[in-house]
């Protein structure tokens, strides 16, 4: 799993005025929980870009006044107009404690159904996975080679080592449906064979 180092400072005073001052200075108020105590801190907004604006799951190596803590982003709040980060929640990771996280789905290979003119429909782009931090996959690969027109790949078909997918096993991740052009071509071919039989 990819990890990024971020420096943070423990906040002495907590409140709206303090949070506003932090944002004005280019920092983001944050909370670290999951450990023995809950810690209020601030991190640089610029440092968060590599963590928040990526489809990948990233571990954060939080350096808090000389002490390093391994964490993940549990939640982030954004300003409704400027889209800037206004607050962030970090969850401290423990190598012995399972964590639940959304892992991106990566489609691999080429679907024979798509080659024939079918339309690819991806319903799930991320799956909720529960595992120990060391067993979390970077991404979940879904092979496309067996997807003919009318076929789909479901959550139940995902195989992970030492990790469990929490989504409903019947949920469809990706499917290949008949496109309008393919349906039209099939109807025209059927009409032509009927016409040829007369």
Image: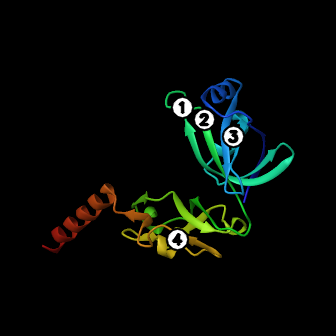
The answer to which of marks 4 and 3 sits earlier in the sequence is 3
Q: Where does label 2 land, which residue?
A: 85
**Relative vertical location of residue 87 with respect to residue 141 in this rendering, above or below:** above
> Residue drawn 26% across and 65% down?
189
Real-space CA distance between mark 4 and mark 1, rounded to the nearest whole angstrom: 42 Å
Label 4: element kind: loop
User: Split into 4 quadrants, where in the image is the N terminus?
Assistant: bottom right
Label 4 neighbour load within 10 Å: few <14, some 14-19, many 20+: few
The answer to which of marks 2 and 1 sits earlier in the sequence is 1
Label 2 neighbour load within 10 Å: few <14, some 14-19, many 20+: some
Q: Where is residue 61 in the image (x, y as percent from the top left)?
A: 77, 51
Q: In which quarter of the image is residue 165?
A: bottom right
Q: Where does label 4 land, which residue?
A: 145
Q: Where does label 3 land, which residue?
A: 48
The answer to the question of whether label 3 and label 2 lie on touching residues, with beta carbons closer than 8 A, is yes
> Residue drawn 54% across and 63% down?
128
Label 2: element kind: strand
The answer to which of marks 4 and 1 sits earlier in the sequence is 1
Real-space CA distance between mark 2 and mark 1, rounded to the nearest whole angstrom: 6 Å
Q: Position of residue 175 (x, y in %)?
A: 42, 65
The answer to which of marks 3 and 2 sits earlier in the sequence is 3
Q: Of the residues tagged 4 and 2, which is closer to the observer?
A: 2
Q: Where does label 1 land, which residue?
A: 79
Label 3 neighbour load within 10 Å: few <14, some 14-19, many 20+: some
The answer to the question of whether label 2 and label 1 lie on touching residues, with beta carbons closer than 8 A, is yes
Label 1: element kind: loop
> Residue drawn 62% across and 42% down?
88
The answer to which of marks 1 and 3 sits earlier in the sequence is 3
């Amino acid at each position: 799993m990819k990890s990024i180092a971020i420096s943070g400072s423990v906040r002495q005073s907590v409140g709206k005025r303090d949070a506003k001052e932090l944002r004005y200075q280019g920092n983001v108020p944050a909370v670290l929980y999951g450990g023995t105590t809950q810690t209020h801190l601030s991190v640089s907004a610029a440092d968060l870009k590599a963590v928040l604006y990526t489809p990948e799951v990233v571990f954060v190596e939080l350096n808090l006044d000389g002490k390093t803590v391994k964490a993940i982003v549990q939640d982030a709040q954004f300003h409704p107009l400027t889209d800037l980060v206004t607050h962030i929640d970090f969850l401290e990771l423990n190598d012995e404690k399972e964590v639940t996280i959304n892992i991106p789905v990566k489609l691999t290979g080429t679907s024979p159904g798509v080659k024939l003119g079918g339309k690819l429909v991806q319903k799930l782009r991320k799956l909720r996975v529960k595992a120990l931090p060391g067993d979390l996959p970077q991404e979940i690969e879904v092979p496309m080679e067996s997807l003919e027109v009318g076929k789909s790949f479901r959550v139940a078909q995902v195989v992970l080592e030492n990790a469990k997918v929490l989504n409903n096993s019947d949920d469809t991740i990706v499917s290949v449906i008949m496109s309008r052009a393919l349906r039209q071509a099939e109807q025209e071919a059927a009409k032509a064979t009927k016409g040829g039989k007369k």
